[in-house]
Amino acid sequence: MSRRTLLQKVWDLHTVRRLPTGQTQLFIGLHLIHEVTTPQAFDMLRARGAGVAFPERTYATVDHIVPTRDQGRPFADELAEQMMAALERNCREFGIRFADLGSDRQGIVHVIGPELGLTQPGMTIACGDSHTSTHGAFGAVAFGIGTSQVRDVLASQSLAIDPLKVRRITVSGTLGPGVYAKDVILEIIARLGVKGGVGFAYEYGGPAIEQMSMDERMTVCNMSIEGGARAGYVNPDETTFRYLAGRPFAPEGDAFERAKQWWASMASDDGAPYDDEVVIDGDAIEPRVTWGINPGQSVGVSERIPDPGASATEEAQADADAGALGEALDFMGFAAGAPIAGTKVDVAFVGSCTNSRLTDLREAARVVRGQRIAPHVRALAVPGSKAVRQAAEAEGLHEVFLEAGFEWRGAGCSMCLAMNPDRLNGREVCASSSNRNFKGRQGSPTGRTLLMSPAMVAAAAVSGEVTDVRRMLG
Amino acid sequence: MATSSADRRIDRISGTAIPLRGNNIDTDRIIPARYLKAITFEGLGEHVFEDDRASMPDHPFENPAYAGASILVVNENFGSGSSREHAPQALKRWGIGACVGESFSEIFLGNATTIGLPCATADAEGVERLMASAEGNPRTHLTLSVAGGRVEAGGHFVPIRMPDAVREALLSGQWDATALLLDRFDEVRAVSARLPYVAGF
């Protein structure tokens, strides 16, 4: 058989048929659902008298709206309570497993899927959330979908979808100390642009990616959509298999050995054809910080905020025209040509589906251990799941954060997206380990977000301004 | 199903245009996340672009001259970011019947199609002509033809494009995919039966 990419193998295996419209009907191996994008989908099902075709291939949790401090029911926010009650009712009615607030398995949907071993190589995965690309870290093909498509998957366990092209992104070399997966993906988006990935799945590979832990690979794949790519993946390898061994929903014993063989066979073949290939020099990446209003607008921490008046540099965003630069600078209130380091921050947020896993918390804690956050800074550490929270506490990380002046919260999406009580006020500037610096994203229409790695967030919390974390790591 | 696919066919959308300049207008801007905290899509129309409208007094959605417009004209990568279907739902409920832009985010395009909101692309020059004509005279009447692959505005024609599958889905009334996907459910079962992970290896 001809050489194929992982995407092509997964696609071929999961294709039900070609629809009369020309789209592919693709079987979905795992459907993850949460409270925000599903209530209308279940209502549409009921209106048609349809059922859930494969409830055993569906798994629910609650993450976006949950308060991370006071989780008593009913929630103080009546709308949040309604959404929670709707998901409870829908899961009960249709026989869907639900990691609810009372369960030890609750957490951000893109944290718990992998953590429970639900996410596996070679699968197709869908969820009504654009960061579903996270699950590609395991060599799954994972899509974010809208509510009507959630209805489609509930009803038929399949999606009507157009095939994707594949862009291979090779990250060469070795990341320096203090440089993380977050910096790699911010560099990739800055290089290829926020719409550079439209029509593509991104296949991440090369030495710098292969050396990454699963947590780090998830960070990279998570932000594929910020580069316009609907899916992103890493070919499965021993790191993937070691992570999955012993997880609650992973196969066991002989079945695990058979699974490993099949998983390995799904990786892209040597010499498989790609629609495009890009090489990024991993040795040259430095900690990055966004200065603007989309995730493509980032610079290295030693660099300056771009100047729309100056001629475009090599490093400039692929899609940055002078008008967009000006709009971003106006909104942020930053001076063109000013160094990004030294930008004062009001809030520090370690969390979100991008960077709320155990290794993220460890790296942030390494920076704040024995330090105090700056007096003007409000800082939150928000584990991505209950399991992450428990594991962090077992290592004493919560004490490190609390002693430094951070708040230590319960699991949820928290300050990434302003659907719960955690949000910015007024024009606050937030050093954030999340994924989007859009206007208004963190809950204040005029609030400002600087995206960076968890370690860089920790460094900003301690110094009260954007700081090169490499100077703080011994 | 309440209606047959024949009743759902979408080809021509007529009305005035609303031009919204700027690249990468994301779904958080189209509908801020606080309006996702609801179990229905009802009432989203009035909150479309709410924060942008509050901070930009000259925002087209604040401008009474564009009230009642049915064709939204945008630039590049419209609808980037979150997968929230609430974004095209809010536009549709405000009264938008079709979008024309230089490019759209993929998830937004899929969501819009599946609720019967056609999104067509035109080149930068075509988009500029449509925007300029609406800005010059907001009462300019436009007709977008999915089958004809063009927008007619004040006697001029701007060619538009759509992915074949989207055009076909709109013209055949099969943009709501559920019925199609259930049409041969035995084939779905057959695929599930051949997947090693479904069988538990």
Image (cartoon, rainbow, N blue to C red):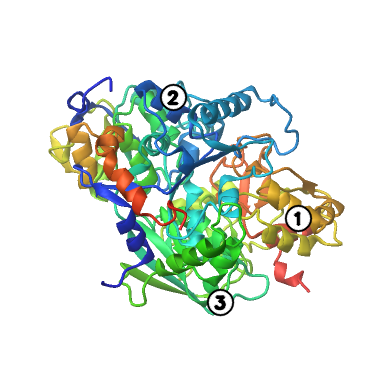
Parent chain of label 3: A
How many labels sit on residues?
3
| Precedes in sequence: disc 3 or disc 1 | 3
Q: Residues within 10 Å of mark 3 (few under 14, many from 20)?
A: few
Toward the viewer: A334 or A453?
Answer: A453
Quarter of the image containing the C terminus of chain A? Answer: bottom right
Toward the viewer: B92 or A343?
Answer: B92
Q: Is residue A49 left or right of residue A205?
A: left
Q: Please tell me the numbered disc located at residue B31.
A: none
Q: Nearer the viewer, mark 2 or mark 3?
A: 2
Q: Please tell me the numbered disc located at residue A43.
A: 2
Toward the viewer: A394 or B62?
Answer: A394
Image quarter for residue B176? top left
x, y (%) of residue B103? Answer: 32, 48
Q: Is residue A439 above or below residue A151?
A: below
Q: Residues within 10 Å of mark 1 (few under 14, many from 20)?
A: some
For marks 3 and 1, give the CA distance: 32 Å
Q: Is residue A261 above or below residue B173?
A: below
x, y (%) of residue B71? Answer: 28, 31
Q: At x 58% / y 28%, what residue is drawn? A: A88
Amino acid carrying mark 2 in the image: Asp
Amino acid carrying mark 3 in the image: Ala
Dot 1 corresponds to which residue? Answer: A392
Parent chain of label 1: A
| Local SS, label 3 | helix
Question: Are the numbered discs 3 and 1 placed on the same chain, yes or no?
Answer: yes
Q: Please tell me the numbered disc located at residue A284.
A: 3
Q: Residues within 10 Å of mark 2 (few under 14, many from 20)?
A: some
Q: Is residue A211 left or right of residue A348?
A: left
Question: Are the numbered discs 1 and 2 placed on the same chain, yes or no?
Answer: yes
